[in-house]
Image (cartoon, rainbow, N blue to C red):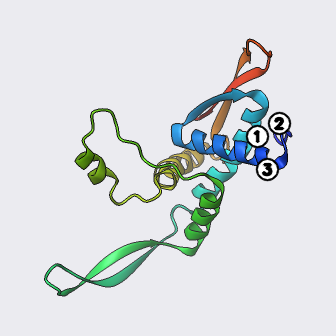
Amino acid sequence: MANAKLGRPSKEKNALVRGQVTDLLWNGKIETTLAKAKSVRSKAEKILTLAINSYEDIVKVEKEIKDANGVKVKTTVANDGPKKLQARRMIMAYVYDRQEQRKPKESKAAFEARTKDIKHPLLEKIFNVYAPKYAERAKELGQGGGYTRVIKLGQRRGDAAELAIVELI
């Protein structure tokens, strides 16, 4: 059932699953039908595994940068290594790009200061929040996988479709 047709042509089905996987990774929890939940769980687990296996691949590089006075200054910059770069590109090709939203009562200046260096906030969240969290959990429990949970809610009123919640654990 994880690879169900979901009553749609393959292009529409793939777009639907991509959208729901993106929403799951962005919000941490979505409500959908059971068949869609199982498809979303499968894809989300693969994306998280890809991030977990490569998030520590960082290469330190020294660069010369001109400061405000025009003087060259050497600085150390952390770049993605080849393994992390490949994983980042694969994840970017699958999930939709979500942009950070302004919080209620947040000024425009505060919002711009908070998000000035973040180009792809969903990718940053996957690599900086989820990957270290689940890698630590894998070391403690000695197992990989199991990053998501599907909870059945019962039948939907109207068409009696089985509803479920998919959430990141």
Q: Are marks 1 and 3 in contact (CB under 8 Å)?
A: no
Disc 2 versus disc 3: distance between alpha carbons? Answer: 11 Å
Tell me the element at label 3.
helix
Neighbours of disc 2 within 10 Å: few (<14), some (14-19), many (20+): some
Q: If you read the primary sequence from the N terminus, does the residue marked by circle 1 or circle 3 appear first? A: 3
Q: Nearer the viewer, residue 71 or 129?
A: 71
| Residues marked 1 and 2 touching at CB (< 8 Å) | yes
Of mark 2 and mark 3, the one earlier in the sequence is 2
Residue 68 spot, x, y in % from top left: 16, 78
Residue labelled with disc 3? 11
What is the three-letter code of the residue carrying label 1?
Ser
Closest to the observer, 161 or 149: 161
Q: Nearer the viewer, residue 161 or 74?
A: 161
160 relative to 37, above or below: above
The label nearer to you, 2 versus 3, is 3
- Circle 2: residue type: Leu
Indicate left or right for 147 with 127 as reference: right
Q: Residue at x 71, y 43 (%)?
A: 17
Lower sequence index among marks 1 and 2: 2
Task: Identify the mark at residue 129; answer none if there is no mark.
Answer: none
Residue sitting at x 85%, y 35%: 7
Question: Where does residue 134 sit, x and y in percent of width and height?
Answer: 56, 46
Q: Amino acid type of disc 3? A: Lys
Left or right: 112 with respect to 20? Answer: left
| Mark number, residue 39 | 1
Name the residue rendered at 68%, 47% in the picture: 18
Q: Residue furthest left?
A: 69
